Image (cartoon, coloured by chain):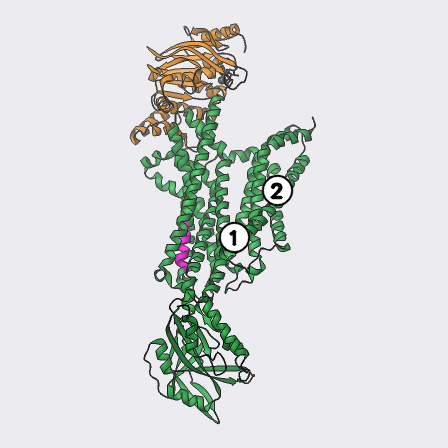
Chain colours: A orange, B green
Amino acid sequence: MTILEANNIFKVYGEFNGERETVALNNINLLINRGDFVAIMGPSGSGKTTLLNILSGIDQPTSGEVTIGGENLNEMKSDALAHFRRKQLGFVFQDFNLLDSLTVKENIMLPMILEKKNLTEMEEKIHELASLFEIKSILNKYPYHISGGQQQRTAVSRALVNEPQIIFADEPTGNLDSKSSTAIMECFERIVDKMSTTVLLVTHDVFAASYCQKVIFIRDGAVHSSISKTTNRNAFLTEIMDNLTLLGGR
Amino acid sequence: MTFNKIVWKMAKHHYKKYIFYLVCNSLAVTFFFMFTTVYLNKQLVEMEQSEGIQYVLSIPGVALFTFTIFFMSYAHHIFMKKRRSEFGLFMTLGMTRREISKLIVLENSIIALISLIIGVLIGATLSKFFFWLLLKFVGIQEILFQLHAKMFLYTVIVFLVMFFVAVGQSLYLTFKKNIITNLKNEKITENVSDKHARLGGIGLLIVIGSIIGLYFTYTGHRGGDFLLLWSLATFIGLYIVLYHFTSLLIELIKKNKGYYYRRLLYLTNINYKYKRLTSVMMLVTVMIMVTLLYSTIILFTYITTEREAIEETPFDVAFIQTDSTNNVGIDAVKAIFEQNGNRVQRHVSVPIYSYFQKDYYEVVHAYTFMSLDAFNELTSSQFELKNNEFIYFLNENTETPESIPYDQGLRIPSGSDEIIYDVKEVIAEKRMNTLSNLSEIFVINDTELSRLKRSVDGLAAVVHLINLEDWQNSKTEVKKLKQTFESLHASTPAINVEHIVPEDELFQISSRIEGYEKNKNSNGILFFVTIFLSVLFFIGSFFLLYIQLFSEVDKELERIRKLYRIGITSKEIKRMISQEITTIFMIPTLLGTTLALLYILAMATDIGGVIANPEIILHFLIVGGSYFVLQFAFLFYARKKMYRLLSTKLAHSIDKANI
Ligand SMILES: Nc1ncnc2c1ncn2[C@@H]1O[C@H](COP(=O)(O)OP(=O)(O)O)[C@@H](O)[C@H]1O
Ligand SMILES: [Mg+2]
């Protein structure tokens, strides 16, 4: 069952500013199914972040359409879109995107608070996620006092708190050491397995991508190829590396 | 490209930073200089007022002084915070510490010098304008704008001291402290703890205690001496309260989780910012308090000028008539007033008899006697006196003295004998205008007065007390009466009372209109000076809040961008910004207003309490109300500006796909 559909996405930068035009996305078509765990890979500057931002409604395409769960993002007004995004979508970023003034617990709760959920529901959800991601002991600490891995697990918990249909992650392991990266990728694995959430991540980290079931390669703003995991993770890792060599760049 | 060129190029690129710093410094100099032009104005200092202007301005002076100092160091701090990252870059490029120190000192010196010049020029111009307004609208001729060396000297000294302290501190910070740790410290939010809450409570107690202390000490002649002390205590307490205020509040609010979470973003962000804001809040609160307090008090004095005049001069016109002075028939006097239709409504003539006595040191003492009949008429009372009794009549509005110098009886030598009177009653009430020696009067019965006149040498006179239909319109008539008396004086021989009463005193006319105009003049000056200071304070406090808000706009943007990424609506953002700005503007306003009101209540004991002077509350409401209106106008302006700035910046950063 399709959850996300992108048709003929173009994104051109500098069109109006008189700068030199950059075609960041050049006719992208995508289909993501419920429960998919997909990575988008490509060299730096190939348009990964741009694509993810457009798919998740943070940015608008120059042309083309994005539909999530049957709703066309292009047709939504900005506040409706914001409501849709915080209810239906979850976000994880390279820089964690946590608020310094809030404790871990408050950071996780924030999307629920914005949705005006009731107190017991919030407490239950926090409890559930904190045990799942092993952050119970740091719930009352401020982001500044915890490690990058813990911050990212906090961010993943926050992304999940409103039980979204799909989670978008832009380089979630980009600022983490290998141990924390593993932990985060295992978190995503767990989410997909246990909650049958859909996860779409952008990365240029081969190791992180190997956790996914499918990898889509893009180059110069267009889909180049895609592969699916058929065997175990190590074999998939080698396959991804081979494809990257084919793709060129780094 | 040489280093100097790089530095110069960067400076040119970041010229806005320098302009900001320059504006702040110039503003500080302007404020300070304007204040000195008032504070050190010779005519104002020597103004005919029981309390000189420097006394009246002592608290606003301290407040303004603190403000100026704070404002400068604050501006410097913001400037250097931005500069320091660049210095880091210069250092990695190989610039030595010595060179950087030189750079810091050089650029700060240049800015300081320019600010001094600009500030003094603007300050002098504005101040001159202010004095012109004073002349134009209050019609105060005797106070002229002046500049003298002391004003420049004080301004330059204060400015330079501040400057060296600030620059020294910056040099220290730039090298001794790790920049990274500085940055880190900013991010850490202090946890709310019991200790903070308790300290906040202590601060509150200090504030309350100081106001109660003021209430009980602000009476009598020396009451004002403690004012500065109590206000210092209030300010210290206020600082403690402010510092722990949000912790205290949030701890309380956290008890109700639902309520707390619903306002989570707002509360945590206020708390987060607040600690760094404490000094700004403190200063703004104090400025608002001082402004409201002084404006109210001065407005009260200004508006009650009339009441004061009525109290000071019970009769519209009064003069003393003797055989050889002012000896114009009362009908002629009445005619002067009535020729222009100002009817004489009441005329009381009080015969008095003054007896003079030289003491051992050749000092002349005057004893003025009044007949009981006249006294009873004057005070509409029905006292009776035996032959050997007198009423001690103090013609002043003071408390009745507990003991008088004549407790043992008043002894008047008469030939080889003595006439002795015993005091029957002591009465202190202003019933006549102040004229010559009409302050201490001995009332004796009519037979005794006749006897006294016969047995001791003295001066017989009649005090004429006149009430008019319309005293406000008696200026020309009073003048005419004066001229009449003077020309009469010129054509009559000198009075024959052995150099006892300065003869001039006997010619004086005490009129309500003159007293009123004199008071109006000096109160007018005070009123104007206060308005001038209020405007300075208002602009100053607004600037401070404004700079505070907008210097942190990048942080704010960062936070909003984070929120935007997880799906906050623009409506929610707008509400959040609005709530925060409103809080930051309104907390000092509310606190300052409350404190001013409490101070007014405490200080009103000196004039018999607020209950006896309900107008003072009215005046407070007028002043406070106008302040609120202005503050709201500024608040809306700042909010609109902030919202616009943030939304364009946010849109820009989304477009740049940095989200
Ligand atoms: N706001 C922007 N304005 C102009 N060009 C942009 C903007 N954002 C991205 N680009 C360009 O679009 C291309 C894709 O960028 P991006 O999506 O960030 O790539 P990736 O995430 O794969 O490194 C790059 O060439 C980049 O320079
Ligand atoms: Mg990217």
User: Circle 2 is placed at which residue position?
Assistant: B167
- Please indicate whether residue B638 sits to the left or right of residue B176 in the image: left
Q: Which x, y percent locates residue B207?
A: 42, 53
Residue at screen point 57% across, 53% down: B36
Q: Which residues are magenta?
A: B593-603
Chain where mark 2 sits: B
Q: Which mark is residue B604?
A: none
Q: Amino acid at mark 2?
A: Val
Q: Main secondary structure of the magenta part?
A: helix
Q: Is B99 situated left or right of B515 in this image? A: right
Dot 2 crowding, Cα within 10 Å, few <14, some 14–19, many 20+? many
Indicate whether residue B596 is drawn in magenta: yes
* Residue sitting farthest toward the front: B339
Q: Give the chain letter at badge 1.
A: B
Q: Would you say residue A201 sits in the magenta stretch? A: no
Side (left or right) of B151 relative to A177: right
Q: Give the percent coordinates (x, y) of residue B303.
A: 42, 59
Residue at 34% over, 20% down: A88
Identify which amino acid the numbered label 1 is placed on: Leu
Residue B626 appears anywhere in the view = yes
Front disc: 2 or 1? 1
Question: Which mark is first along the chain, 1 or 2?
Answer: 1
Q: Is mark 2 within 8 Å of ligand 1?
A: no
- Up the image or down, A119 lies above or below A5; here it is below
Coordinates of residue B75 in the picture (x, y in percent): 55, 41
User: As displayed, is residue B414 above or below residue B601?
Assistant: below
